[in-house]
Image: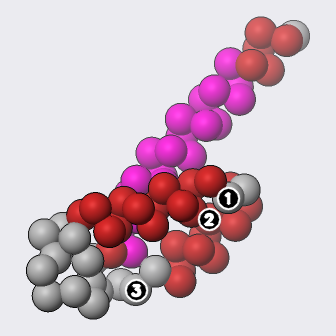
Amino acid sequence: MSVSRCMGRALKIAEAPRATWADAIAAVPEACPHADCTGGQGCRARVADYLRIQWRMVAAREQRRERAAA
């Protein structure tokens, strides 16, 4: 899977509620099924890395909102 294919899948998963991300990541193939892959790592690892960063950003944003509301 090329990077663009991996990232497209990651962006689609990111639109779903965070509680569903783990199952969605587990459904991503570990190895790329495409011969023209330029990702350099497995699809699941790339998607998981991206969503890990997104999770931290969303959590930090929620904490800032909670502190501002208090």
Which type of secondary structure does the marked residue at label 2 adopt? helix
Asked if residue 40 can be seen in this view, the reply is no
Q: Residue at x 62, y 53 (%)?
A: 15
Q: Residue at x 68, y 18 (%)?
A: 64
Task: In this rendered view, identify the residue nearer to me: 31 or 2.
Answer: 2
Which circle's residue, 1 or 3, is located before the other in the chain?
Answer: 1
Q: Which residue is mark 2?
A: 21
The boundaries of the magenta stretch are 44-64
Q: Which residue is mark 3?
A: 29
Q: CA distance from mark 3 to mark 2?
A: 14 Å
Q: Which residue is mark 1?
A: 16
The three-letter code of the residue at mark 3 reads Pro
Q: Is residue 42 magenta?
A: no
Tell me residue 29's x, y (percent): 40, 86
The three-letter code of the residue at mark 2 reads Trp
Q: CA distance from mark 1 to mark 2?
A: 7 Å
Tell me residue 23's x, y (percent): 63, 76
Q: Main secondary structure of the magenta part?
A: helix
Q: Is residue 54 above or below residue 9?
A: above
Task: In this rendered view, identify the residue nearer to me: 12 or 18.
Answer: 12
Viewport quadrant of the C terminus = top right
Which circle's residue, 3 or 2, is located before the other in the chain?
Answer: 2
Please give left or right for residue 68 compared with residue 54 in the image. Answer: right
Q: Is residue 38 above or below residue 65?
A: below
The three-letter code of the residue at mark 1 reads Ala
Tell me residue 44's x, y (percent): 39, 75
Q: Are marks 1 and 2 in contact (CB under 8 Å)?
A: yes
Q: Residue at x 26, y 77 (%)?
A: 1
